[in-house]
Image (cartoon, helix red, strand yellow):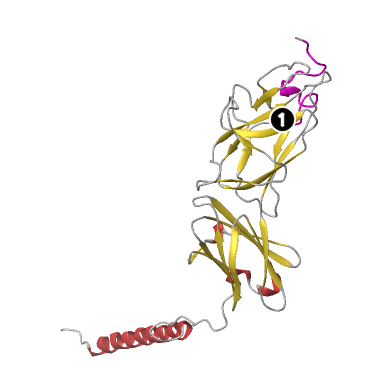
Amino acid sequence: MSTPRNCVLILSLLLAAFGSIVSSVHGDQLPPSVLTANCGTSSTALVANVSSVVAGSSGIILFSCGSNSPAITVINGGTVAPQFSLPSHYSSLMISTSPECASGTILSSGSSLTFGTEAGMLAVGRYYYCATFSDAPSSGLAAFTVTWTQSTAVSTIGCGHNVSCNIQSNATLSNLRFAGVTIHVEADGSSGAHGYANVTVPKMDIPNINELHVFVDNSKLSSSAVVLSSNSTDYFIYFTFTFHSPVLIDIQLTVPENAATPTILGLDPTLFYEIVEVLIAVIVIVSAALVVHRRGRTRPTI
C-alpha cells in the first residue's frame, strides 16, 4: 500500500489535510442556536477515522471529535444551511447519526435543512460528518471548509407616520398588520422548538420606551424577557418564544390614545386619593376636637 504525499488524515493537522468546519449565526441579536460545533474550530480540530488513504482508492471518511464523539450537536429545532465547496476527488458530504456512516443526509451547499419533531424533519441530536471520495490523488486530498448559517426571514410592515417596521425571525410569519399602536403577527414553526423575533421600530413610533409592551399569546412578557437596544434612529426589540400552531404576537408601541383610564369606585385614581387624604385629615381633626371637648367637661373628684 502506498501512502500519497500529505495524505495523513488526522485532522489535528487540518491546515495540511482538511479545512476546519465551523458554525456561525448572524444577526443583531443572536437567536437560539440550532446546532453547536463540538469541534472543527480553530482551537479544537476534527479527527478522521483513518490515518491514511491509498492513492487511486475510493471510500468514505468519518469526521468526529475523536473517540467517535459527534462533530455537531443539534440542540434546537430550526432551519440551517451549510455553505461549502468540495475540491476535486470528493463526491459528497453528509451528516449521519451513525459512527459507521451507514446512512445519513447528503448536504448541498446553500440548501436548507430543517430539524424538529414533525414528519419530514431531521431529528434533534448528535451528528457526524461523512465525506465520500474517489480516485484519491497521490498529492493528497485537498482542504475544504463548511460554514453553517441559521436561516432567518425579514418581513416589513407599515407602522404609522409613513414609516416601516421590520421583523426578523426564524419563524414563518403571517397575518401581519398594524392597528392603532400595535403590531400584530402570527409565527409558525416546528412545535416545541424555540423561536425568536428581532423587531426594528423607528424611534418616532415609541415616544416613551417604558410604555412599550410585548404580548405572546395574550400574555405580557416581563421586562427581563425583552432585550432592547437602539441606534440613533431605531429601537431593536428582541424576544423568544416556543412554537405551537400558531404563536400570536402583539407589540404595543405606546399607550393607545383611546385607552380607558383605570378608575377606583368610578373615580379617577388621582381624585380618589385626594378625597381620601381630605377625609383622613377631617377625621383626625374631628377626633382631636372631641378629645379636647371631653377633657374640658371632666371635673376632678374631691
Q: Is residue 196 left or right of residue 52?
A: left
Check the image and report above or below for 161 versus 231: below
Q: Quadrant of the N terminus?
A: top right
Question: From where the camera sits, is residue 45 visible?
Answer: no
Question: From where the camera sits, is residue 47 visible?
Answer: yes
Residue 41 lies in magenta, yes or no?
no
From the viewer's side, name the closer residue of 240 and 177. 177
Give how far across and how far down residue 168 sits, in percent. 66, 59
Residue located at (25% from left, 87% from top): 294
Q: Quadrant of residue 65?
A: top right
Q: Quadrant of residue 148?
A: top right
Check the image and report above or below for 198 versus 62: below
Check the image and report above or below for 164 versus 76: below
Query: Which secondary structure type mostly characterizes the magenta part of the structure?
Result: loop
Q: Which residues are magenta?
A: 2-20
From the viewer's side, name the closer residue of 217 and 136. 136
Check the image and report above or below for 8 versus 187: above
- Residue lying farthest to the left in this orientation: 302
Residue located at (57% from left, 76% from top): 255
Residue 4 lies in magenta, yes or no?
yes
Q: How many marks?
A: 1
- Amino acid type assigned to the residue bearing label 1 in the image: Ser
Give how far across and how far down residue 105 sits, in percent. 61, 37
Q: Is residue 14 left or right of residue 173?
A: right
Give the crowd class for mark 1: few <14, some 14-19, many >=20 residues within 10 Å: few
Give how far across and how far down residue 238 sits, in percent. 62, 59
Q: Which residue is mark 1?
A: 43
Give how far across and how far down residue 259 sits, in percent. 52, 81
Secondary structure beneath dot 1 equals loop
Q: Quadrant of the C terminus?
A: bottom left
